[in-house]
Amino acid sequence: MSKALSRISSLAGFIAVISQPALSQNVLQQQSQQDFSRLLSPGIIKRTLTPEKLKQLQEEASKDCFSPESFQKAVPPLDPNQPRPLPCAPKNPFDRFVMWNQIALDTTAIDHAPPPPGEKASPALQHLGPHRSSRAMAIVHIAMFDAINVATRFNQQNPSKPIYTFDTYSKNIPELKHIVSLDTVITYAAGEALKSLYKEQAQVIQDFINKDEVTILSGKDRKDPFYSEARELGRAAAKAILDNRKDDGSAHTEPEVGQEGFPLRMEPGQWRPDPVSNIVTALGGRWGSVRPFVIRNVATFRPPPPPSLDDARYTQDFDEVRRLGGDGNGRSGKSDRSQEQEETGIFWAYDGTAFLCAPPRLYNQIIRQIVQQKTKEMRGHGEDPVLLNYARIFAMSNIAMADAAIAAWDAKYHYRFWRPVIGIRSAQTDGNTNTNPDLYWRALGAPASNSIRGPNFTPPFPAYPSGHATFGGALFDTLRSFFPEETKFDFTSDEYNGINQPAGSDTPRKIITRHFENFRSAEDENARSRIYLGVHWQFDADVGIAQGNQVGSYIAANSLRCLTKEGKPIDCKPTSPPEIVSKFLLTTEKRVLITPQSPATQ
């Protein structure tokens, strides 16, 4: 019996009383804290702010914020307790919005860096995992959007300008009395939201606010009523969304296998912990009961069951992940995976590891890359993009990902389907004569990037559907509401940015930039990458994309709606007045949930 199973067996029948964690408390229980520190800790923070790194940061801080290349060579997050320069030099509200998006992504990256075993978490892992980080990023971007929206609504009462606005997410934000600076509004909306969410990093975030305030004021009077009104609007927008989410069901510690509601299930097809990493956490086990941001009934987005263990589709995907997803070492034999496939798997990973965070950070980087690229194109044609539209893209995309996480984790723990590492090792129990067991098979695994030891691991939650695929489906379906499907873009993953390292290595991975001809190709590659790591079945990926698409379509149709100047909702389609939708089009393409079928019936 593995160490994980022996630990779990000793917990069997134990009824845990899960307390509501304080806002600054680690969301992991003691055993899970030890497991995550053992597996993912980068050790003593090596990225202290040396004079050389400070110089590099200062060089990056002097660069323009709103260009596709601006953050790609930036130093990754440092010791969270060390003050540091702003990420870039904002020259206008566009720059400032992008800068605070970067600060938010750095904050959540630091939040995923466990301390060495036995040391106090600093900061505590307050929003660990893809589910919690998606909620945090949605809150920050809603705060910025609502503040910008209210300010724009008042500022554009000037009859010489086109009047358009959108529905705010929070409904209790006071209206303005004067035209105010969007720069100030953005800084305080984002900064106050981040301080509340990441209390253990609040000092550094406040330092960012103070430094940014200096650049905004540039000699202006802090007592200027217009400045004060802008500051209070930003704070009010942050408070409104934070108050809205205060009792949403997220304030619980993560359960562990063997506790009430999460028994160790040994039946064929049932999920149980990874025997390689020995993590007993049932990460996100209660997340399906969190109140969504927009969707009304999570169960309506629940996909059909995965294929039965004797189904031809299961056999097909079993054989494929066994061939392509193994680590290729030890007694399980050589993998058929190509070098490019392995790089693809790692490229999209961001598996909750130190300084990389979880998938929502990856997808925010993709949003920013596309928005920056489109802005550059528009300015090249002499057009001036509208900040409010971009704030809406970020807010709607992050809402879609947050609700997609709730829907995906609801399905994961409803079906509790096993991961390949268990399914392949336990194939003798599945009743399928066409699947052959391999008792020693190991997945290539989610890369434990920047960890001092690793090993690579299978994420500690059930397989079906794939979280990566669901996030990606939600993101790209939301982006289709703003940009054409055939949008081309390049993206450099932080897994391959020349800075971050494989587990146990001091040598950074090389730089890889991938080109995508359209959203579909990126969406499919993101989902497919999980098979190359050996952590998912292909049907997890197919159904995850479809579930995410459904959530994304619903969010696009039911949140942050276009309004006329009289405040009435209006359909944001190409036929709408151009001053309302600017350059963004709403596509009509929809996908339906894919019911897993055998190849013969597809």
Image (cartoon, grey):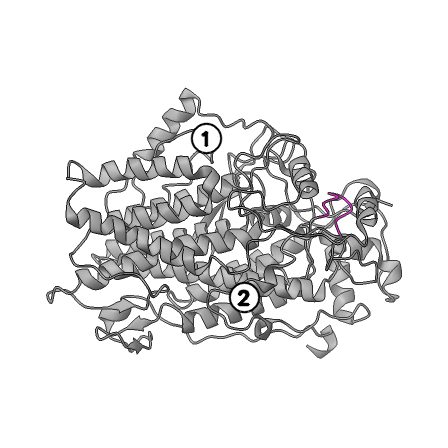
Which mark lies nearer to you, 1 or 2?
Answer: 1
Residue 399 coordinates in the image, percent (x, y):
45, 61
Using the image as rendered, state which of residue 267 and residue 191 is in the foreground. 191
Q: Residue at x 39, y 52 (%)?
A: 368
Q: Is residue 538 above or below residue 350?
A: below
Q: Which residue is mark 1?
A: 81
Residue 394 is situated, as x and y percent measured from the top left of the image, at 39, 57
- Residue 133, placed above or below residue 543: above
Magenta residues, dominant SS class: loop
Task: Give the distance between the C-alpha atoms of the residues marked 1 and 2, in whole angstroms.
Answer: 37 Å
Classify 44 as above or below 213: above
Instruction: State which tag comes first along the sequence, 1 or 2.
Output: 1
Task: Give the residue type at disc 1.
Answer: Asn
Q: Is residue 376 visible?
A: no
Q: Which residue is mark 2?
A: 548
Which quadrant of the structure image shows residue 224?
Answer: top left
Can the viewer see residue 163 in this picture?
yes
Q: Which residues are magenta?
A: 273-280
Q: Is residue 275 magenta?
A: yes
